[in-house]
Every structure is written in structure tokens, then in C-alpha cells.
Amino acid sequence: MSQTDLFDAQASGQVSMVAGCDEVGRGPWAGPVVAAAVVLDPSRPIAGLADSKALSPRRRAALDAQIREQSLGWSIAESSVEEIDRLNILQATMLAMQRAVATLPCRIDLLLVDGNRTPSVAMPCRAIVGGDAAHPAISAASIIAKVYRDRLMAELGQQYPGYGFEQHSGYGTAVHRAALLTLGPCAAHRRSFAPIRRLSALPR
């Protein structure tokens, strides 16, 4: 569904409450995967919404505050490292999305999800490849999910010093790899991920 089609559907009364949903953190070696869902208020448009990866941290933080204040509803949910290791990252991501949608404070008629898969939810749902750059509600969800997860990973950086989580948010950077070679994995690491399995087996 294009943005024009969505506007036409809303104008005709086919749908009234549309939520966007996106996830952050499928690729990192550590930390939870986070999903967010947002219902924007058509009467209070937010300028500058875009894929969170295309925005500076400062701009993301400003938009995060604006989205939380001006949207009709928003929610954030996680799947833990334990759930990622037990279920696999795809299923854990779908679970986080389900939790985010289930905890929205308002009823929705249509869910738009970034990507090519949809979670199992009670309302009509459409997957849109590149949706985080094309649909404002999905962009908003990607922004608040990323700001939340980056802050969470900074907290994990204090809890598990030496890994640099506050710098790389758990992604497989050279700094992260070097820390793992020295320290080994901690409780925040996804042991089902091949790089962690391999690095865990190396003598230190």
C-alpha cells in the first residue's frame, strides 16, 4: 500500500486508525531485539520522519520526544537474549512486534510493517519493503525503537564494562570482536549467533 493509497483509504473511511511497526536489533551479537508500534495523529503531522538509520543521533532524539508527545499511541516491546537463543532471531523479532502491537493504548484497523514478513496479529497487516523510509508511521516506529535500544545498550555498557556496548550497540565491530577475544561472552551476548559460538570456543 502506497502512501497515496493509504490516504485514499482513510479518506473513504475504509480505515481510520493505522499503526506502523518496525524493529531494531536483529543483527547485533548482543542485547535484545526491540520493536515499536506507533499510531500517528493526522491532525498533528511530524516533519522530518525518515528511516532512523538515516538520521543523526541528535535528530533521532528530538523526533523521539515529538513522536511520544504528539502521536495517538505508541508502544515499545522487547524479546530477550534468552528468547532469541531459544526461538531464533526471526521468531523473536515477530514476538517483539506482537508485544508492541498488543500493548498499543488504542484500537487499530490496519498495521503496516517494515520488511517482507508480518507478525501474527488480530488486525489486517501489510508488510512493506523499505517501509521505514516510505511511510511516516513506520518511520516513527523505527525512530523510537532505535532511540530506546541505543539507550538500553548504553546501560548494558555500564553493567558489562569493556565490551563497548555504548559505542556499537552490540553490533559485530572490530572493537567488539577484540573485547570478546579478551573477555569472552557475557550474559548479554546471543550465544546462538555463529560469531559468538566461534569466539566462545577460542582459548583466552
Image (tube, helix red, strand yellow):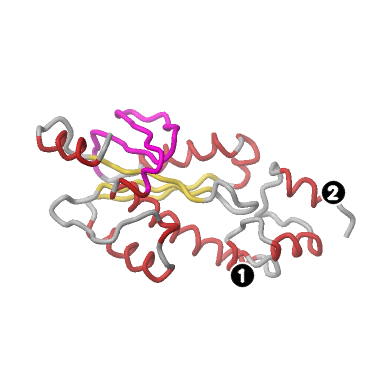
Residue at point 23% right, 33% down? 109
Is 17 situated above or below 24? above
Q: Amino acid at mark 1?
A: Gln
Horizontal placement of 170 versus 119: left or right?
right
Count of marks, rendered view: 2
Q: Residue at x 34, y 51 (%)?
A: 139
Looking at the image, is mark 2 or mark 1 earlier in the sequence?
Answer: 1
Residue at x 54% of width, y 38% of height: 92
| Rendering coords of residue 163 (x, y %) | 69, 65
Name the residue that disc number 2 marks.
201
Instruction: Give the SS element for disc 2.
Output: helix
**Discs 2, 1 touching: Cβ within 8 Å:** no
Q: Residue at x 26, y 37 (%)?
A: 2
Q: Position of residue 190 (x, y in %)?
A: 67, 48
Of the pair 91 and 113, the residue shown nearer to us? 113
Q: Image check: 102 left or right of 160?
A: left
The stretch in magenta equals: 106-132
Choose top left, top right, bottom left or bottom right for residue 127.
top left
**Is 170 included in the stretch rendered in magenta?**
no
Give residue 117's position: percent from left, percent from top.
45, 32
Any magenta on residue 125?
Answer: yes
Q: Quadrant of the C terminus?
A: bottom right
* Of residues 98 and 167, the one drawn nearer to the viewer in this rendering: 167
Within 10 angstroms of label 1, few (less than 14), some, or many (20 or more) residues?
A: few
Estimate the x, y position of residue 95 in percent, counting from the top left.
48, 37
Residue highlighted by disc 1: 158
Identify the element where label 1 is drawn.
helix
Q: Is residue 7 left or right of residue 118?
A: left
Please state which amino acid type lies under the numbered disc 2.
Ala
Mark 2 neighbour density, 10 Å: few (under 14) some (14–19) many (20 or more)? few
Cα distance between the residues tagged 2 and 1: 25 Å
